[in-house]
Amino acid sequence: MYKTALLIIITTVFLADTAFAGLSFVKKTRLITKESDNVVLQQKYFSEGDMLRVEEESSGIEGNPGIKIYDFKKKKLYTIMLNVKLYLEQDFMAEKDVVMFEPSPEKKYVIGKEIKVEKTKKGENTIEGRITTVSEVKVVRKAEKGKEKGEQVLEKYLMWEAGELDGMPVKYEFELSGESKKIIEYVDIKTDVIDPSLFAIPEGYKAISPF
């Protein structure tokens, strides 16, 4: 049962990127406390094939921090610094779905006899006109034999997946300490072909070496 749940999580994340000619969206990360509800990070994603462009804007940083272009075939990351017209080329080994979405439990934990993953459907909800399936994902460490301590919940969160987008996750909700929450939302989702020039180094930019 748990292996099946893991397979569903992995498959839906994979299909979300490969089912379309191109995919773009805005990813907003919000931090909610008793006192405030703030967008702490906002990113614009453009994805097609082995290429990914991420434009970042975050609170507390003056101006645009820059643009990152990932070439997953060459395993390269290009960080473009707009204000100074420079770019940095680095080797990069992470998988595309980890950059675009929250890592699935199997990428964060060693799933086996001691740790299990439970995915429970909680209902349906409509986000931006799309019907989504709401599920609770829970990672549990089983109780050790001969010890009184029961199961330990290592991680628990809610996830909204859009069926018409082949199960793409469009929202996450994480419970944090102190009655606070972290919410990640994917909005303004489009499945159009992406302009190839978005994955190119801008003309006139010079390369710099890593420190």
Image (cartoon, helix red, strand yellow):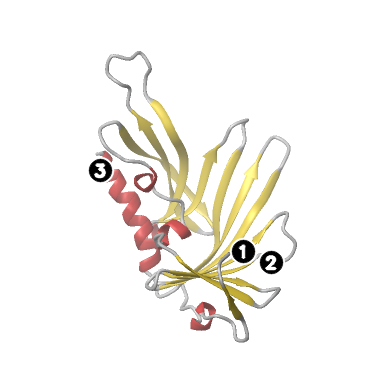
Which residue is at 47% across, 76% downward? 192
**Residue at the disc numbered 1:** 56
Q: Check whether the beta carbons of the residues at disc 3 and disc 1 lie within 8 A of each other.
A: no
Mark 3 or 1: in front is 1
Sequence-wise, the earlier of marks 3 and 1 is 3
Q: Position of residue 182 (x, y in %)?
A: 58, 43
Sequence-wise, the earlier of marks 1 and 2 is 1
Q: In the picture shown, does residue 109 fall above or below 128?
A: above
Q: Nearer the viewer, residue 183 or 104?
A: 104
Which residue is at 46% across, 78% downward? 193
Q: Amino acid at mark 2?
A: Asn
Q: In the picture shown, does residue 17 fall above or below 84?
A: above
Q: Check whether the beta carbons of the residues at disc 1 and disc 2 lie within 8 A of each other.
A: yes
**Residue at the disc numbered 3:** 3
Q: Position of residue 201 (x, y in %)?
A: 55, 80
**Residue at the disc numbered 2:** 64
Which residue is at 38% across, 36% downward? 139
Horizontal relation, residue 183 to residue 38: left or right:
left
- Dot 3 lies on which element? helix
Sequence-wise, the earlier of marks 3 and 2 is 3
Mark 3 or 2: in front is 2
